[in-house]
Structure formats: structure tokens, C-alpha cells
Amino acid sequence: MTYDLDHHGDAELAPGLTDLAVNVRAGTPPPWLRAVLHRAVDDVAAYPDAGPARAAVAAAHGRPPEEVLLAAGAAEVFVLVARVLAPRRAVVVHPSFTEPEAALRAAGHPVERLVLEAPGYRLDPAAVPDDADLVVLGNPTNPTSVLHPAGAVAALARPGRVLVVDEAFADTVPGEPESLAGRRDLPGVLVVRSLTKTWGLAGLRVGCALGPAELVALLAAAQPHWPVSTPALAALTACTTPAARAEADAAAVELAAHRAALLAALPAGVEVAGEPRSSFVLLRVPDGARVRAELRARGWAVRRGDTFPGLDADHLRVAVRDPGTSRAFAGDLAEILGPPSPTSRTAPPVPEEIR
Ligand SMILES: Cc1ncc(COP(=O)(O)O)c(C=O)c1O
């Protein structure tokens, strides 16, 4: 089975479609953050000074600045890990975001997949080979929306192994109870964070990683000078203030209610994978390719599941939106899954690039 590891939800979008395919929080960035970015543009004649942003991120997670790597998004961290480390046995826990595996393969490393099992997609730390010296997993996990207990993830840490925990969606969970971002006691743990999802900054390219100082220094040495722009640094600083963190937490609380509304509206015949805890849910429907095409015909872009190792065409990932949008989506899904009505439109073929 081969999977298109380079496929991402943005490829599912087209003018006129409602975006349920990309998990960036709707209505972001907020006006105050746009103002921060606009002001930062006035300072771009000078080279960036990463010091204040690094200190702010460090303080927010209770770590010294030497344990903070600033990067052009989580995606850059995955590439740095792949280019700098020389793993003998790299294991990626799937189904999950595919960039870490793609980066490892691009750097020439063989990758083993540990595919978690439906319907719960729960992590059993004992299933990870003892001699794996690089392990990657996401928490909460894209695309299953499953949140692994911190204890199960921490159990994977050991001397001689780098454990990369992709926490790009950690701030979609109120209180971030299972985050390892502040854990300095665990050997070799590199926690990767992103501003993309909660703050709507996919186009800015800004994220960070938290881990042992020696590992951070090794990764930083492979970056170009000034890897993070002045506006991106300004956003990092602004999004780590107590007020911004409280705003993110309030958004996570609201998200949980919106997710419950989406789940309650789903029609019979739709299976929900795992116990969703993030800003998207993974669904399983019969004849998923047809359903996805018919959803497109009715104006909905959802994320195909079959590019994720461990999933197939019957899996669809759907972003959590406001309850009105979710109910309208669920209504159309019910009609598509129900007995064909004489008035239902025939779906056009799925375009080549998203098939
Ligand atoms: C789980 C996960 N990690 C990381 C990323 C990439 O984040 P960034 O925009 O910070 O590179 C994504 C983007 O889709 C993601 O879904």
C-alpha cells in the first residue's frame, strides 16, 4: 500500500467550497494579532532579534531559553530532525500527520510505521520497538483527534532515543492536560509546537520546539541565520502572553462544545473514530469516495483519509466549525447517505489533483 505523504488538506479547497478540510481555527488571526503583525512590518529593515521571543516561549513553558528552538513552523523542525539526526531505527506512529515521515524519507532514512488500531487508535507504549532510537508521534493526533495520556507518551522516552512529540494541536485541548512541553525530566523528548492552527498563522510560518539544550543546539546549528522573520517573532511573543494563552484556552473550551454539536448532528451510518479531542473529527462512512465527491458537489470540502497510513477512502476528516455550519453539513451528509431521492444531483467527478 502506498500513500501520498505530500498530500495536505489545503489541496482539497476550491473557490465556493466551505472549508472543513484544513484545521485552522475559523475567524483567525484575531484583530489584535493582525495589529501586532502590521506593527512588526515597520521593523523589518533590521535583521530579526530572536532573543525576546525565545525568552517569552521559554518562560511560558517553564524552561530556560537554551531549551527552545524557534523555527519556520513545525514543518521546519521535522526537516531539521531528519537532516541532523542519523537514526538507526526510526519509528513513526500512524495514522498521523505525514510530514515527519516524508522529511525522514527525503533525508534518506528508512522509516518503520507503527499503525495504531481502529476504532480507538490508542497508543500502547509496549508496541514501540525497544531499540527504536527515533520515535515520532502526534498528541493530540492528526487525523484521529485522539489525545494520548501524557503517561503513555512519557513512557516512550529513554536515554539513547529522541522522542518527537508533535503537539501542533495541543492548545486545542482546554488546559493542555497531556502536554509534555514543560517536562524537563524526560530524556530526549522534543516537543514540537505551532502557531498555525489556533492563531490562524499558516502563511506566516512560525513554530517552535522544546527539548534538551544539546539537542536544540544541534538542530539550531543546521538552520540558516535568522530563520524566523521579525513578524513571526512578534507573533510568537504576543501569543505567549498570559492574556493570549487565556484566549486560546477559552477558544479550546468553546471548541469542545462545538465538537459535541457536530458529533450530535451526525447521521446514522457514520462511525466516529476514537474519542475526538481536537479541532477535527475522523469519520468513517460507507463508499467514502462517492460521499466525498457528493459533499463537494454540495459545497463542502472535507479532508480525504486515504493518504494517511492506516486509513482508507472511507475515512474523512472533518474540521469542527460553529454548530450552524456543522448541522448544515450533517444534514447534507444524511441526505447523501440516505436512500437516493429523485431530486438529488449527480456528483461531478472528483478532480485529478484531489483524487
Ligand atoms: C499535526 C500537525 N503538525 C504540524 C503541522 C505543521 O505545522 P506548521 O504550520 O507549524 O508547520 C500540521 C499542519 O497541518 C499538523 O497537522
Image (cartoon, grey):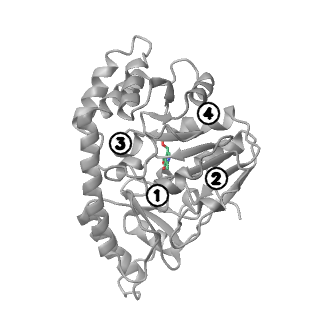
In this view, 209 is above or below 226: below
Query: Which badge, 1 or 4, comes first in the chain's sequence?
Result: 4
Q: CA distance from mark 4 to mark 2?
A: 16 Å
Residue 206 is labelled as: none
Q: Quadrant of residue 33?
A: top left
In this view, 349 is above or below 31: below
In the foreground, 175 or 275: 175
Residue underneath mark 3: 200
Q: CA distance from mark 2 to mark 1?
A: 18 Å
- Residue 326 lies, in percent from the top left, at 30, 66
Query: Which badge, 3 or 4, comes first in the chain's sequence?
Result: 4
For label 2, count other residues whose C-alpha is less than 10 Å away and answer few (under 14), some (14-19) or many (20+): many
13 left or right of 92 in image: left
Instruction: Report if residue 348 is visible in the image.
Output: no
Q: Quadrant of residue 256?
A: bottom left
Query: Which badge, 2 or 1, comes first in the chain's sequence?
Result: 2
Residue underneath mark 1: 149
Q: Residue at the spot x=42%, y=81% of the render?
A: 337
Q: CA distance from mark 1 to mark 3?
A: 27 Å
- Residue 102 lies, in percent from the top left, at 65, 47
2 or 1: mark nearer the eye: 1
Q: CA distance from mark 3 to mark 4?
A: 24 Å
Residue 92 is labelled as: 2
Give amino acid for label 2.
Answer: Val
Residue 80 is labelled as: 4
